């Protein structure tokens, strides 16, 4: 049964049976959000919008890492 707060269907419906949170809790904020939006793409609303959000967080993480290396 889907619980919209603790086990939302769009995060728990992956064919693997794994919930998104079980993976992303081991990542930093930006990478976790990118995976979250990729995971749910097409399951809740606009798939293109979800992928654009993932792209936003990936670019943000790239900028953070480049800055940390002194490349920013």
Image (spheres, rainbow, N blue to C red):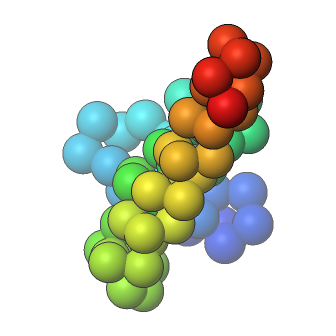
From this viewpoint, which residue is outermost toward the top? 69
**Is residue 71 shown above or below 9?**
above
Residue 65 seen in this snapshot: no
From this viewpoint, which residue is outermost toward the left? 15
- Residue 59 is left or right of residue 17, and the answer is right
Q: Position of residue 52 (x, y in %)?
A: 42, 69
Q: Position of residue 31 (x, y in %)?
A: 59, 37
Disc tally is 0
| Quadrant showing the C terminus | top right
Residue 48 seen in this snapshot: yes
Q: Residue at x 28, y 36 (%)?
A: 16
Q: Position of residue 57 (x, y in %)?
A: 58, 51
**Is residue 46 shown above or below 3?**
below
Q: Position of residue 14 (x, y in %)?
A: 33, 49
Toward the viewer: 20 or 12? Answer: 20
- Residue 37 is left or right of residue 30, and the answer is left
- Residue 37 is left or right of residue 60, and the answer is left
Dividing the picture into quadrants, the one containing residue 61 is top right
**Is residue 53 shown above or below 69?**
below
Q: Residue at x 36, y 39 (%)?
A: 17
**Is residue 11 shown above or below 5?**
above
Toward the viewer: 68 or 28? Answer: 68
From this viewpoint, which residue is outermost toward the bottom? 45
């Amino acid at each position: 049964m889907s619980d919209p707060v603790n086990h939302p269907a769009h995060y728990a419906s992956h064919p693997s049976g794994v919930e998104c949170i079980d993976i992303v809790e081991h990542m930093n904020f930006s990478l976790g959000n990118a995976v979250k939006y990729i995971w749910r793409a097409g399951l809740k609303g606009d798939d293109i919008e979800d992928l654009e959000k993932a792209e936003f967080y990936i670019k943000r993480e790239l900028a953070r890492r480049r800055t940390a290396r002194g490349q920013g």
